[in-house]
Amino acid sequence: MPFHVVQSLGSISVYPVAIKQPGLKGTLRHFFRREYRNVEAVKQVSFQIEPGEVVGFLGPNGAGKTTTLKMLTGLIHPSTGQVTVAGATPFQRAAPFLQQITLVMGQKQQLLWDLPALDSLRINAAIYGISDRQFRDRVNELADMLDLQEKLAQPVRKLSLGERMKAEMLAALLHRPQVLFLDEPTLGLDVNAQVAVRNFLKTYNQRYGATVLLTSHYMADITALCERVLLIYQGELIYDGRLDQLLEQFSPYREVAIEFDCSLPSEKLQTYGELKSLEGCQAVFLVKRDRLTQTVSQILADLPVQDLTVTDPPVEDVIGRVFQAGAV
Ligand SMILES: Nc1ncnc2c1ncn2[C@@H]1O[C@H](COP(=O)(O)OP(=O)(O)OP(=O)(O)O)[C@@H](O)[C@H]1O
């Protein structure tokens, strides 16, 4: 039987949610005799991830990504189904399992706010039983990879968001985990910091053969790192396969944004592609991938363009198309 680093078989996660009727009567009843209904946040989700794979985990807000990551890291127990990660049952939270995994959440921080990052790293080293020598070597290596050497002695509160996220990444990887669960690791970062984090993850994956499951609402993270994606919608896994096939099937467009001379009549703009938005002197078109070069050259030749950018549609748009196409 092949060894799957991450395996979820028919996992279901049910949260009990308290229901309260409106009004004073409802409040009193809620206080003395609370009623609950069960919400299935994740329904029968099954997938396997092989050693060294970097897999994107996509879905709209509330789809069940974080809940799945919590099951995979043992923070919550699946209500039904079986989860195996690195040969262990996550919920047992056994020390050898915890040594092999890490969970990074873009909206949570583990570094202590008032202390230099280096002090928090020392605490982590003590927790994971990392020797002084290993500590020095690993901090130096990771700080070089993240371009963070100068910043580790400063209190965390003085770091920029991008620097703090990189320091969080360093802290999460100090014990050299083999399986990385990353929940929006680039949340709120500017483009340069996003690229730095992405490059770092790519290098870490290649250098240590680590397995990565990554959620992000930034499509660029996913396209830069993941050949394979899992798509989850309302708790159900609706796609497991290659990213390029998903994009080709459901997002055969790229977004072309232009800033132009405001005197241009809007009818003229309609001729270059589906006009997604038009605000003041800025327009965004959806242009088919196979017509991109031709359309961009035509726009530059025809119009008094001051600026032009080509981007992938946001991940939410791609997912929207998947549902519009009736793939669910
Ligand atoms: N502790 C909880 N108690 C009750 N319901 C919860 C709890 N945690 C999550 N949920 C619900 O489960 C569903 C899935 O939430 P989850 O956080 O897994 O979504 P997500 O895909 O990570 O979303 P986002 O992209 O917004 O982070 C949501 O409807 C959410 O309201």
Image (cartoon, rainbow, N blue to C red):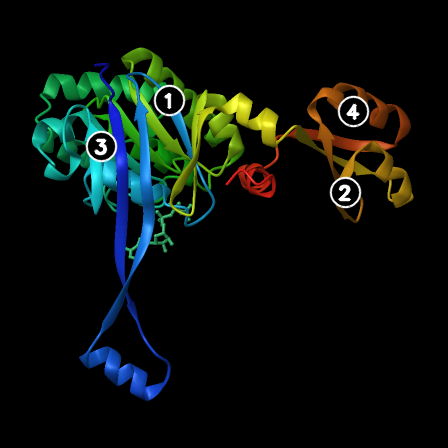
- Report which residue position mark 2 lands on: 282
Q: Nearer the viewer, mark 2 or mark 4?
A: 4
Residue at numbered disc 1: 54
Q: Residue 87 placed where, x, y %?
A: 16, 24
Mark 4 against mark 1, which lies toward the viewer?
A: 1
Q: CA distance from mark 1 to mark 2?
A: 36 Å
Between 285 and 157, the residue placed more toward the observer is 285
> Mark 3 sits on what residue?
118
- The alpha-carbon separation of the residues under discs 2 and 4 comes to 15 Å
Q: Give the mark, 4 or 3, whose residue is nearer the N terminus.
A: 3
**Which circle's residue, 4 or 1, is located before the other in the chain?**
1
Mark 4 highlights which residue?
Answer: 296
Q: Is residue 211 left or right of residue 89?
A: right
**Element at badge 4?**
helix
**Neighbour tally class for label 3: few under 14, some 14-19, many 20 plus, Cα within 10 Å:** some
Task: Pick whichever, 232 or 143, lies toward us.
Answer: 232
Report the residue at 26% width, 55% height from top: 15
Q: Earlier in the sequence, mark 3 or mark 2?
A: 3
Is residue 192 found left or right of 106 in the rendered image? right
Q: Nearer the viewer, mark 3 or mark 1?
A: 1
